[in-house]
Amino acid sequence: MVNLSYIVDKWKLSSQDMWEDKNVIGVSENSKKVNENFIFVAIEGDNATGYRYIPEALKRGAVAIVGEKDLPLDISREVKKYGVPYFKSNEPRRFLAELAHLIAGEPTNNITIIGITGTNGKTTITYMVENILREAGIKVGRFGTLGYKLEDEYIEAIHTTPFAEDLVELFLRAKRKRISHIVMEVSSHSLAQHRVAGIKFDVCGFTNLTQDHLDFHKTMEDYLKAKLKLFEMTANSGGVGIVNISDTYARFFLSVPGLKFFT
């Protein structure tokens, strides 16, 4: 449980509405998952806008709405009718992920998180690392394209890297199972969309970079920037970087400050 005033101050949210401080027990971008004392985050998607789901979130008990743009007039009237404040955030996806981790008690703080990124080879490496750790007697989980595995529990994968709320739930399951290490594929989409914001990465690995996903990233420069975010996040945790030095783009990853590197 977190006070709304703390959230507004920590993430520098802005609002033109009058609002009172309330306890917040959850956050979601899915209006169907909203319950009493939740914050609903209206995310702009590729095929739909989160603003259209605000009325449902209000009916289900949302105490605040967060989005990036001004609300359409009809939605704004609906929000005011419920007396719920609307806050603007420059990065609502990042806000959603970081707040979800905070409310959950920062579950990755006590788990060693190993993130693998690159165009090819992520799945193979996560399997290798998982097996090495298991042979060493370590309780390990693995998240990736072929599913999410928590010891003897297997969950089918919808995305290589789950969305923020789903990731938090997976980490909480891992804690309940006393899993100490998780190795996960970290896709460029998840990095660009801040799905992995709030995770404390201890180790990051880079395999290679080739032309792929340019329908989403548009340019190789943007694709590279997305991949580098994993190394920057790990540097913020004082972690370790492992780089395939034979790849043309290796030098960009090795230039990220604050990491101890192995090649």
Image (cartoon, grey):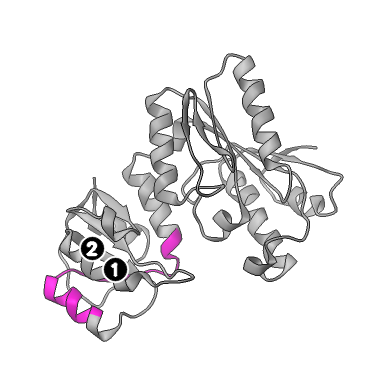
Q: Quadrant of residue 114?
A: top right
**12 lies above or below 236:** below
Rendered location of residue 2, percent (x, y) = 25, 49
Any magenta on residue 244? no
**Left or right for 40, reference 169:** left
Which residue is disc 2 drawn over?
57
**112 lies above or below 164:** above
Count the labels in the image. 2
| Towards the viewer: 156 or 37 | 156
Q: What residue do we see at 23% from left, 80% from top?
A: 76
**Left or right for 64, reference 211:** left
Q: Which residues are magenta?
A: 75-93
The reply to whether residue 14 is in sight is no
Instruction: Quarter of the image for the C terminus: give it.
Output: top right
Any magenta on residue 82? yes
Q: Quadrant of residue 80?
A: bottom left
- Label 2 crowding class (10 Å Cα cut-off): few <14, some 14-19, many 20+? many
User: In the structure shown, which secondary structural element does the residue marked by tag 1 occupy?
Assistant: helix
Going by the numbered disc 1, the residue's amino acid type is Tyr
Which residue is disc 1 drawn over?
53
Q: What residue do we see at 34% from left, 41% from top?
A: 104
Rendered location of residue 138, percent (x, y) = 56, 18
Rendered location of residue 254, percent (x, y) = 76, 48
The reply to whether residue 113 is in sight is yes
Going by the numbered disc 2, the residue's amino acid type is Ala
**Is mark 1 in CB contact (under 8 Å) with mark 2?**
yes
Instruction: Quarter of the image for the N terminus: give it.
Output: top left
Q: What residue do we see at 34% from left, 39% from top?
A: 105
User: In the structure shown, which secondary structural element does the residue marked by tag 2 occupy?
Assistant: helix
| Residue 154 numbered mark, or none | none
**72 lies above or below 159:** below
